[in-house]
Amino acid sequence: MKTLTQYREDIRNLMKKASDIDAKATMENRDLLEAELALKNEILDTVEDLTKTVQTMERQDRMSAILDTPQTPLTVEKNHALSVHQVADKNKDSFSSLGQQMAAVFHAGQPGGKVDPRLFNAASGLNETVPSEGGLR
């Protein structure tokens, strides 16, 4: 079986032959003869068949690449399963992106702006009064 590169090269060569038939008729300032039309149609039929083969091989390569790409597994601590409600609650209490959080800060700073309750979720571990938790002595 040929490779994709070989099939593509065959297609280029056949298309050149078809173009050469047109060029010859143009140089002689005439229309294509019946034999030339028949040969050109035969060439184009072959090109069409080869193109289908190339498309199928390219599709197979794409599918193989997708299947060969390692997927990041979803891991959960041993003996601990997350329920759908736990995942939903976690997403409800936090921003999905930094941009979303910055937009909430911007709107809260506007006169009469609505303050998003998620902005009050303070980070833990930034206690200023306890030195072991990030505070000063």
Image (cartoon, grey):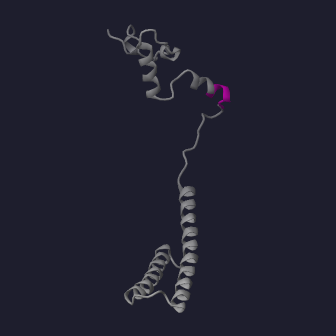
Return the residue nearer the eye: 54 or 20: 20
From this view, report whether residue 63 is shown above or below residue 30: above
Q: Which corner quadrant holds the C terminus?
A: top left
Start-end of magenta stretch = 81-87
- The percent coordinates of residue 134 (x first, y second) are 37, 15
| Observer able to see residue 83 | no
User: Residue at horizontal 48%, vertical 78%?
Assistant: 11
The magenta stretch spans residue 82: yes
- The percent coordinates of residue 88 (x first, y second) are 62, 26
Seen in the image, is 107 located left or right of residue 88? left
From this view, report whether residue 89 is shown above or below residue 77: above
Return the residue nearer the eye: 22 or 66: 22
The magenta stretch spans residue 93: no
Seen in the image, is 62 located left or right of residue 105? right
User: Residue at horizontal 53%, vertical 88%?
Assistant: 39
Seen in the image, is 80 located left or right of residue 35? right
- The percent coordinates of residue 93 (x first, y second) are 55, 20
